[in-house]
């Protein structure tokens, strides 16, 4: 466990308060009071660390790190590339990003830099090295935090300047070798888009080329490579005088970067979680969304991750920023641990007095010091975590189910035209995850490069693109006894968005032959009966033929394709494949997956039927540690749970478990 215990703390910006020594003293005193043991320094401190080109001022930072150290508070030290100082942008305008429309950004804001610019690369490398030399071996510094939310804040997160355009062309040369091959892979003769010179290739632009999905997907692949390269460069710079591990903070289902690629550059995954609690009275959709993102972070490296940022109270960047209802702060923190986090870190420790985030919640508000509800909520978490540290040390979630979440598939399915224009890939995937979550079945998220062995069930909703090797991998998985679920509009195109011809690449495994696909308007909603209940079919309804030996679990009931398969099951080798021909909704997915879980021999950690709004996860080590979370704002009981011990109170729990509103209980028993 990084730091030797669960981390509790967050982003700390003392550079905003350097002229108020009494504030800096109070900070440390109150951190102790709130049970804070780790803070992140330096995320946006470039202007203070290097006030003039080549002139470094690190003394203030050293004093702060040492004062924290005296009180046993650990430090995550960031490199400051997340925001550039004005002297830099004034002297070297090339460091500022150019947007897709060709306009260069003006100075200001943040995440505004070109990832290719040699000047930017040189300046930040020099600064990172100097930071490494000065702080890389300090006793209480435990982790490097590279930059901040890479590719965040502007457009597609990329820079479209001339330097980036030529880097893109070089990347394409490397990938395709010849223009002939590129034109073939991109189907260039369509609309006469044949390239005869590499210089003719330009990044996707609103006033230029955005209609060629092969190009737009390749551009996104390139951007991921370019930014991963930038990240590796920073990582090497801080490694110059330091052996500390490195991370960068990810965001939720973030389209601009393929995190499965970027994660390879990092020692530990961390992310920033800002769920929209109390968006509606039913917290389940948001709870499942937040759970899914935690699980995705864990899945990247199949080990514990860090919750790097979360709001101690409200945020300031939505139109509705509801206060967390009593109990929700603790529950939200526990949810992170439940899915594999080894920390609860906040943005931010103290509210600044001015500029963009002065109304963003913080542990310390502008007024009333520690005498606030938020401070008490945070202190409660600070008091609870130490008791869980040794219990969770060395444990990790090990799901037997996986859900495909593949960035290249995401980019392709949303960029392509037809059979709909409004695909939201994460929504499709998360709806499936929600059916898992409601039944307490944890899932890993995997991409098409993943090793599927070890899973009993793999679900691949809206799996439009089959990257090279994927069909073979799924075939092996199913023939070896795995259970595979997929949906309509899957297996359509290869890596460069060229449609497969002849037949569906997994026709033999799925036992169906797709013929047509209906994207009906609301008035033409169809329906089917599954296990005696009626469900809608809408949005996308594939019309497929079942092959001999394929079981029909449901058929359409209306329109000219009434009687055609809506849900099928097909045995292949020692496994089974399910095909969902139509989009339906959570009610159907809940019923469907209940049966699939039974078939796959998957049950939740309590082996119990869970009331709506309650879920469970398990972290395995020497002991089984089970988190039971109630996302309802009212008490509930879970029956039929077997025998457990409440890890925190020592109370024996047999058969029935009571949970208060928004409560999380941690149960344990010896692993078999
Ligand atoms: C992001 C950033 C932080 C801060 C928060 C506010 O996660 O990394 O610097 O702006 O959002 O919610
Ligand atoms: Zn650029």
Image (spheres, grey):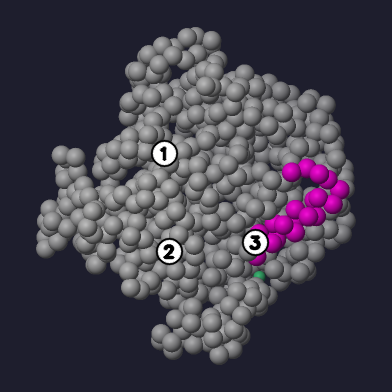
Residues marked 3 and 2 touching at CB (< 8 Å)? no
In which quadrant will I find the N terminus? top right
Mark 3 neighbour class, 10 Å CA radius: few under 14, some 14 to 19, many 20 or more: many
**242 drawn magenta:** yes
Q: Which is closer to the viewer, label 2 or label 1?
A: 2
Provide the secondary structure element on which disc 3 rests.
Answer: helix
Could you say which is closer to the camera, residue 392 or residue 554? 554
Mark 1 neighbour class, 10 Å CA radius: few under 14, some 14 to 19, many 20 or more: many
Residue in the picture at 50% in, 14% down: 646
Residue pointed to by mark 2:
465
The residue furthest top is: 651
Residue pointed to by mark 3:
227
Residues marked 2 and 1 touching at CB (< 8 Å)? no
Q: Which is more N-terminal, label 1 or label 3?
A: 3
Cα–Cα span, label 2 and label 1? 26 Å
Task: Please provide the residue range marked out in magenta.
Answer: 226-245
For residue 50, side relative to residue 277 (left or right) = right
Cα–Cα span, label 3 and label 1? 30 Å
Could you say which is closer to the camera, residue 144 or residue 214? 214
Residue 84 rendering spot, x and y as whole percentages: 72, 58
Q: Which is more N-terminal, label 2 or label 3?
A: 3
Residue in the picture at 49% in, 24% down: 626
Residue 288: image tag: 1
Residue 325 rendering spot, x and y as whole percentages: 44, 28
Provide the secondary structure element on which disc 2 rests.
Answer: loop
Q: Is residue 70 visible?
A: yes
């Amino acid at each position: 466990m990084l730091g030797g215990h669960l981390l509790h703390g967050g982003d700390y910006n003392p550079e905003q308060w350097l002229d108020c020594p009494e504030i800096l003293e109070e900070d440390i005193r109150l951190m102790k009071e709130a049970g804070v043991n780790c803070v992140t320094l330096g995320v946006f401190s470039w202007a203070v660390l290097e006030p003039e080109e080549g002139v470094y001022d690190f003394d203030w930072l050293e004093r702060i790190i040492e004062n924290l150290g005296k009180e046993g508070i650990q430090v995550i030290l960031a490199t400051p590339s997340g925001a550039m100082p004005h002297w830099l942008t004034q002297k070297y305008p090339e460091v500022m990003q150019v947007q897709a429309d060709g306009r260069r950004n003006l100075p200001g804001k943040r995440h505004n830099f070109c990832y290719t610019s040699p000047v930017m690369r040189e300046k930040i490398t020099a600064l990172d090295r100097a930071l490494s030399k000065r702080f890389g071996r300090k006793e209480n510094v435990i982790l490097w935090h590279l930059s901040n939310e890479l590719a965040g804040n502007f457009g597609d997160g990329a820079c479209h300047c001339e330097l980036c355009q030529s880097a893109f062309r070089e990347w394409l040369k490397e990938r395709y070798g010849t223009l002939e091959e590129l034109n073939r892979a991109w189907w260039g003769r369509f609309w006469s888009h044949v390239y005869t010179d590499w210089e003719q290739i330009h990044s996707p632009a609103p006033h230029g080329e955005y209609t060629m999905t092969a190009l737009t997907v390749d551009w996104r692949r390139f951007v991921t490579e370019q930014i991963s390269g930038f990240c590796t460069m920073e990582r090497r710079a801080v490694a110059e005088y330091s052996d500390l591990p490195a991370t960068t903070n990810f965001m939720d289902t973030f389209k601009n970067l393929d995190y499965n690629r970027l994660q390879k550059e990092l020692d530990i995954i961390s992310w920033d979680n800002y769920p929209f609690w109390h968006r509606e009275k039913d917290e389940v959709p948001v709870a499942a969304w937040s759970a899914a993102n935690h699980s995705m972070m864990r899945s990247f490296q199949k080990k514990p991750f860090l919750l790097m940022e979360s709001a101690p109270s409200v945020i300031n960047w939505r139109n509705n920023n509801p206060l967390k209802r009593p109990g929700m702060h603790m529950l939200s923190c526990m949810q992170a641990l439940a899915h594999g986090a080894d920390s609860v870190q906040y943005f931010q420790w103290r509210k600044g007095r001015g500029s963009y985030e002065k109304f963003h919640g913080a542990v310390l508000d502008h007024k009333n010091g520690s005498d606030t509800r938020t401070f008490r909520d945070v202190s409660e978490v600070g008091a609870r975590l130490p008791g869980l540290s040794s219990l969770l040390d060395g444990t990790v979630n090990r799901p037997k189910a996986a859900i495909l979440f593949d960035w290249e598939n995401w980019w392709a399915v949303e960029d392509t035209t037809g059979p709909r224009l409004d695909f939201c890939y994460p929504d499709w995937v998360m709806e499936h995850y929600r059916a898992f979550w409601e039944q307490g079945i944890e899932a890993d998220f995997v991409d098409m490069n993943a090793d599927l062995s070890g899973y009993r069930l793999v679900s691949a909703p809206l799996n439009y693109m089959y990257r090279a090797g994927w069909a073979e991998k799924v075939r092996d998985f199913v023939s070896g006894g795995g259970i595979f679920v997929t949906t309509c509009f899957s297996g359509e195109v290869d890596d460069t968005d060229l449609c497969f011809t002849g037949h569906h690449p997994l026709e033999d495994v799925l036992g169906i032959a797709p013929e047509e696909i209906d994207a009906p308007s609301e008035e033409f909603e169809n329906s089917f009966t599954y296990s005696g209940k009626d469900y809608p079919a809408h949005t996308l309804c594939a019309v497929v033929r079942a092959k001999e030996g394929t079981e029909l679990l449901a058929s359409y009931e209306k329109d000219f394709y009434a009687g055609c398969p809506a849900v099928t099951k097909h045995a292949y080798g020692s496994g089974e494949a399910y095909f969902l021909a139509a989009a339906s909704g959570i009610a159907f997915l809940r019923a469907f997956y209940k049966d699939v879980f039974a078939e796959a021999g998957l049950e939740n950690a309590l082996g119990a039927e869970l009331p709506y709004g309650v879920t469970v996860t398990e972290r395995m080590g020497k002991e089984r540690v089970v988190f039971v979370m109630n996302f309802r704002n009212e008490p509930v009981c879970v029956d039929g749970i077997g025998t457990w011990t409440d890890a925190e109170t020592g109370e024996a729990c047999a058969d029935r478990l009571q949970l208060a509103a928004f409560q999380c209980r941690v149960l344990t028993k010896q692993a078999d």
